[in-house]
């Protein structure tokens, strides 16, 4: 596994916040010289610099054993190289701290034995990108190492185009806006992201209003960059947080999570080399909310 540091921070702390590994397992890897920074062996107290390259040679026994689980999967497309999943809100993508089972990966393992993985202990087989637990929508999964390599390259170069729909609180003054604001770790809460000038990276989101409602609006979001929680953080930054966001909104209704869906995706198929485009409708809960807002409009 390769990571690139996004901020100045102790190596062990950074890995604990940005990988699925526990602190004790990270220490074991470091003590076994299985983690290198810029090709060099380092101690757990090493202070990372921005853009340091971290190589994790995970050859120790992983603490979590993956189990197959009968989790319903909404498969939009599949061929010999990839699976395109419509992930429901509330489903964690892969096992990690506090989530060892009941994830999309557990369901995928039950569905097929053909998933790309680095080794028998890989706890993220097939996963080339993620969407948040409470975000729904389209997500690509690799079945082969070749497909994984191509998709990871295309995600890194931003040649894979993803369109999200979000329901924001309040009404936007303009039909189109570009948010160009750097994102990094929240200084007060390390589990959250924030617009900040400290140890951050450039983040650009393009928003287009689809429909204005009574003190809410449905927007189309296109990412120019791909930072953690980017749309959610940028929505909060402009004063229009995503409706029902449990992290970045102060008014939260229990259940479902933020009204954010990965609705469209366009990519080059790793196997056929053809450009493919897929689009899904809003899920039932999201659509029901839109229908409710439509009825409230006073023309």
Image: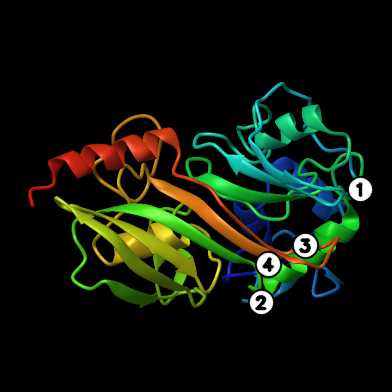
Residue most extreme to the front: 299
> Is label 4 in a helix, a strand or a loop?
helix
Coordinates of residue 212 in the picture (x, y in percent): 21, 57
The Cα atoms of the two marked residues, 1 and 4, are separated by 26 Å
Q: Say which label, 4 or 2, has the lower sequence index.
A: 2
Q: Earlier in the sequence, mark 4 or mark 3?
A: 4
Q: Which mark is residue 51?
A: 2
Q: Can you say whether 178 is above or below 208 in the image?
A: below
Which of the labelled discs sits on residue 155, or is there none? 4
- In this rendered view, identify the residue nearer to me: 193 or 237: 237
- Please state if 258 lies on the left or on the right of 15 as rendered: left
Q: Could you tell me which residue is drawn at 63 percent across and 35 percent down?
A: 74
Q: How far is disc 4 from disc 2 in space, using C-alphas?
A: 18 Å
* Residue 58: x %, y % from top left: 86, 50
Between the C-alphas of marks 4 and 3, the distance is 13 Å
Label 2 crowd (10 A; few <14 / some 14-19 / many >=20): few
Res 33 seen here? no
- Which residue is at 37% across, 75% downward? 179
* Residue denoted by label 3: 269
Of tags 4 and 3, the one toward the viewer is 3
> Which tag, 2 or 3, sits closer to the chain's start?
2
In the displayed structure image, the side of residue 199 where residue 152 appears, left or right: right
Helix, strand or loop at label 1? It is loop
Q: Residues within 10 Å of mark 4 (few under 14, many from 20)?
A: some
Circle 2 — which element?
A: loop
Chain-order first, disc 2 or disc 1? 2
Q: Which mark is residue 59?
A: 1
- Residue 177 x %, y %: 32, 75
């Amino acid at each position: 596994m390769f990571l690139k540091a996004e901020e100045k921070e102790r190596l062990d702390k950074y890995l604990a916040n940005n990988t699925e590994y526990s602190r004790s397992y990270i220490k074991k890897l470091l003590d076994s010289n299985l983690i290198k920074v810029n090709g060099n062996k380092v101690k757990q107290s090493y202070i990372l610099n921005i853009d340091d390259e971290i190589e994790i040679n995970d050859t120790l026994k992983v603490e979590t054993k993956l189990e197959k689980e009968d989790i319903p999967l909404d498969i939009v497309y599949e061929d010999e190289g990839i699976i395109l999943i419509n992930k429901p809100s509330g489903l964690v993508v892969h096992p990690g701290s506090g989530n060892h089972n009941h994830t999309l990966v557990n369901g995928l393992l039950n569905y097929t034995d053909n998933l790309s993985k680095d080794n028998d202990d890989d706890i993220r087989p097939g996963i080339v990108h993620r969407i948040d637990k409470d975000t729904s929508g389209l997500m690509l999964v690799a079945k082969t190492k070749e497909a994984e390599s191509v998709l990871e390259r295309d995600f890194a170069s931003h040649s894979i185009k993803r369109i999200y729909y979000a329901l924001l609180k309040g009404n936007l003054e303009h039909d189109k806006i570009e948010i160009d604001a750097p994102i990094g770790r929240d200084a007060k809460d390390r589990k959250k992201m924030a617009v900040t000038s400290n140890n951050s990276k450039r983040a650009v989101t393009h928003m287009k209003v689809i429909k204005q409602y009574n003190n809410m609006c449905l927007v189309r979001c296109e990412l120019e960059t791909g930072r953690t929680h980017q749309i959610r953080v940028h929505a909060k930054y402009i004063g229009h947080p995503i409706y029902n966001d449990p992290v970045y909104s102060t008014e939260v209704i229990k259940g479902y999570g933020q009204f954010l869906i990965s609705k469209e995706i366009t990519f080059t198929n790793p196997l056929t080399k053809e450009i493919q485009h897929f689009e899904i409708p809003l899920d039932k809960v999201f659509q029901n909310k839109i229908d409710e807002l439509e009825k409230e409009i006073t023309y």
